[in-house]
Amino acid sequence: MYNFTYSNPEMLSDAEHLLGTGESPTLLAGGQTLLPTLKLRLAQHSSLVDLGRIVALKGIVAEGSCLRIGAMTTHWEVASSATVAAAIPALSQLAGMIGDPQVRHRGTIGGSVANNDPSADYPAGCLGLGATIHTNRRDISADDFFVGMFETALENGEIITALSFPVPEVATYVKYPNPASRYALVGVMVSKGVSGIRVAVTGAGNAGVFRDTAIEAALQKNFVADAVPESGVSEDTLMSDMHAAADYRKHLIAVMARRAVAAATS
Amino acid sequence: MTELLVGKSMKRKEDQRLLTGRGRYVDDIRRPGESHAYFVRSPHAHAEIRSVKKDAALASPGVLGVFTGKDIQRDNWGSIPCGWVVTDRYGKPHKAVPHYALTPDKARYVGDHVAVVVAETYAQARDAAELIEIDYHELPPVIDLATAMSGAQIHDLAPQNLCYDWELGEQAEIDAVFARAHHVASLDLVNNRLAPSPMEPRAALAEYDPAQESYTLWSTSQNPHMLRWMLSENVSGIPETKLRVISPDVGGGFGMKIYCYPEETTCLWLSKQVGRPVRWTGDRSESFLADAHGRDHRTRVELALDDKGIFLGLKVDTVANMGAYLSNYATSIPTYFYATLLAGCYKTPVIHCDVKAVFTNTSPVDAYRGAGRPEAAYLIERIIDVAAMEMGVDPIELRRRNFIKPADFPYQTPVHLIYDIGDYDASLDEALRMIDYAGFPARKAESKSRGKLRGIGVACYIEACGVAPSQLIGKMGAGAGLWESAQVRFNVTGTAFVLTGTHGHGQGHETTFGQIVADMFGIPIEHVELVHGDTSQVPMGMGTYGSRSLAVGGSAIVRAAEKVIAKGHKIAAHMLEAAENDVEYARGWYSVPGTNRKVKLTDVAKKAYIPVDYPVGLEPGLDETAFYDPANFTYPAGAHIAEVEIDPETGTLKIVDWVAVDDFGKVINPMIVEGQIHGGLAQGIGQAILENVVYDSETGQLLSGSFMDYAMPRADDFPNFKVGYTETPCTHNPLGAKGAGEAGAIASPPALINAISNALGIRHIDMPATPQRIWRAARAAGAADAQKE
Ligand SMILES: Cc1cc2nc3c(=O)[nH]c(=O)nc-3n(C[C@H](O)[C@H](O)[C@H](O)COP(=O)(O)OP(=O)(O)OC[C@H]3O[C@@H](n4cnc5c(N)ncnc54)[C@H](O)[C@@H]3O)c2cc1C
């Protein structure tokens, strides 16, 4: 770890100010991605602004047909929340599959989404449910938010404050874990509701999470498991690594989507 | 009289300390004025070191020194040795390439030690290390084992990157056997490279005492005496009297911590250079890069059978990866701990093995849990299943037809070893019973009704433990004898210190050895204190590996305890006013049969230290040392059966059942042994389906450099293991014990791969059988089936 200064303001406005100060400041949420990166000296920041004490960034509320989750809500809080379980059980399920208990107790939804790891689970949750990402400056739809691998629409100094999820008619998340990391080798969120039919895939794409339009189109006609075709994406756009080649990932997309639809319709 | 402890599942004495964070590991030890070393490791797999610019680093805050291999060489410190000379097929010794603690000329793998920074703090050392400018001239890396011999030469001494080309058996003999075979089964297989990954990374702390001109080295070593020996004789020239090596609590080793490593060697040198104690504690990234790895073979195996399925001959052709340098025992693993086990449990009359050991630009490879024996068991048990499949014979039946039977012992194999005892049918019978083998077809049908493929796989293994009879291994090229020492110091108040040259790092020696000694002396186990891991306290010993601690170290303890009892006999006779011949000893009491006269060993001990009324001419004291050299290896054997279910749609594997039936001879503590089995199974199953060290074949970068990519098994990857025992006591040691540490890691890879192949109806699938590989195999097998229909 290189040296940095550390602050943990109580007000969002203070955090905003601190994030605009110094050479290379950054936000600290649960630290589950940031701290290992710092320890390995893969990143260097002049200061860390810890969001942990800002009460306004925490909490889960059902607002009509929407579920609003504060950016600093941990995976464990989402997984064990009765409000989430009642509104969008698929989201509880997804959060409960992230990492291990220690990671779930520290890691946050805002941190995960801001980080946009191509194998992380929440990006599929957001895109697959048609979520809106609220920041200190604006609202961004999930469709516009996830730009590429570890890349988002967030600008310098922008802080995610909360996420809103429209409550779907049905939704299921199915994850095929990487045998080593247990991140998603392929994870598929399928939902049907106000945002239409959405099939969002994480773990597979070269540029991070994406919607599988061929599968969505087939499900539009007939929302049953047997209607799920092979994934419509080209293998060239999928990751190939020591764990899984693109063709295997592509195959798993359809299998996971089929299983998700089967679970959603049973 | 107290209850006998041997044979009881006693809770481990050491666990209270270890599980409540009171263990004392190298990193817990603090010395006044200690400084921190940080190693600059090569980012390139193969590169000439043209120059090293130290100035900026030297000027960095807190820095006490920056050193390179040239600096150590100037001090006449030598190369880290390889202690086992393998003589090749032409009668020449293996290529003993140099291995300096810091490489002076060339970096030979990613992670190789190029320079070291010593500073007041770890962070300062690391900061300074980033300021060192090294001019590398990159060379083409040699990574792929299959093409290593045609790659760029890594060592001047080793043309074609060949360390040795070694042969066991007669070519003409094996050719003749294969010429008259009814059937020949053949298979190409890979024994994948593994990163041992104990919980505690390697660490070292070295201190120089200028007054005594002596050094102390705390190290995470499995064998402190051997480390002292090598550092003294081969590397540093420091007399053994001036070098104390201490291995305190050590958090797992699995073979990987047997060796003398560059880091601890460098710290030792630095301690005098900078005049301060110097500490290094590796982090997990460094472990992946620079701990000795295990396995890494490519093999073609061929089995010749007659028309009745009787084995006629076995032919094995292996290329074994040594990595970039020779680790201390690397040469012996794919030869004398591998080819000598190729008879397995079977009466194969002719065996031929060819091994080419080659250098590559990867981390050195040496013994890891099982060491050679897993590689042997894997290919034997795989080729038998392949032969059974091709000949349409039941694989269980084929094994039984070829087993060495109880009446055949002692059995001379065609590959050096003489097995003393065993009963392979007994273990197999028990394993088949425990897993309900007869019920398998019904279970398979039930799985099929759910779209799943069920398979069952058997492996019957044998291993050579109790390493090792000195004369036999001396003939094979070992540079050391592998006897063990023990000293029993009976104290005046009736407690006993037991000093052993073995070293416990998770095995529960304090308990197992305590049980033995408590029974022999009739004293509570709490009164037995095990001392190990300190060369200044314990007589010269040979350490812990090769499942030797109980069979060899425990036997030495028995011998030393017997000497104590024998001396006590003389004192007791004096106290009882009886002739020595009239006195009997049993579990802590000397008595004169037919009378009520008796005296306790603990009272005898007191007498030995207060010898005012004492046998004439007898030395005072009750403190005896024994050295035990085993007459033979021990031969644990057994049968493991795995049952699996595969989801062909995704390639997902579920191990639904596992039975391990082992013959370890006499078992001292069944609970500890069961723990050893579970651990071995975890590592063997890890090898079979999860673990794989992967280097980029073009750049030589380590791709599996963290647990994000190196698939370490987790508890939920396993079923509940069912463990059973059969028992044929070892015939040549006083405990009848054979050793249990490695069996699980030896038996499980073939059992599991046999089960997976059985489920898929295929000949073979390489390790690790990951979901992707299983999915591909299932698809290919499905396509082949569809074509048949
Ligand atoms: C062992 C392990 C296993 C894991 N397994 C999984 C898994 O299976 N699936 C999965 O999805 N993830 C997994 N993770 C990652 C985990 O979910 C992390 O929680 C997540 O990646 C980052 O969240 P965090 O709160 O820890 O963020 P941090 O690490 O604190 O921050 C991550 C990044 O986001 C930025 N950031 C944080 N909060 C905000 C905000 N409110 N606004 C703007 N930027 C912000 C930070 O500046 C930083 O750049 C795993 C992590 C570990 C260590």
Image (spheres, rainbow, N blue to C red):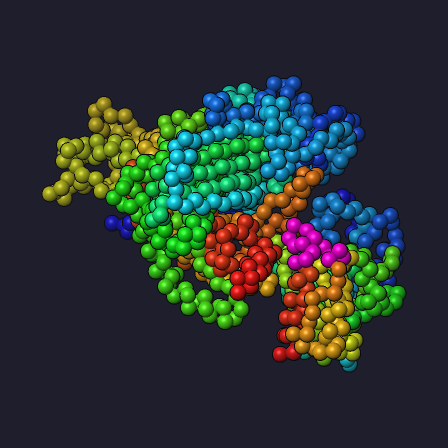
- Front-lying residue, B519 or B678: B678
User: Can you give x and y, in whole percent of width and height, for residue A73 in the image?
Assistant: 72, 66
Q: Tell me, yes or no, if residue B472 can be seen here.
A: yes
Which residue is drawn at the image coordinates 52% and 32% (left, top)? Answer: B356
User: Is residue B494 found left or right of B505 in the rendered image?
Assistant: left
Question: Where in the image, quadrant-wise, is ligand 1 located?
Answer: bottom right
User: Can you give x and y, in whole percent of width and height, for residue B328 in the image?
Assistant: 52, 30
Q: Tell me, yes or no, if residue B524 can be seen here.
A: no
Q: Quadrant of residue A208?
A: bottom right
Q: Is residue B231 above or below residue A146?
A: above
Range of magenta residues: A235-248
User: Is residue A265 found left or right of A70 in the rendered image?
Assistant: left
- Front-lying residue, B597 or B180: B180
**A141 within the magenta span:** no
**A239 within the magenta span:** yes
- Front-lying residue, A259 or A87: A259
User: Can you give x and y, in whole percent of width and height, for residue A256 in the image?
Assistant: 65, 67
Q: Quadrant of residue B595?
A: top left
Which residue is drawn at the image coordinates 55% and 53% (left, top)? Answer: B769
Task: Give the residue at the far bottom of this rendering.
Answer: A64
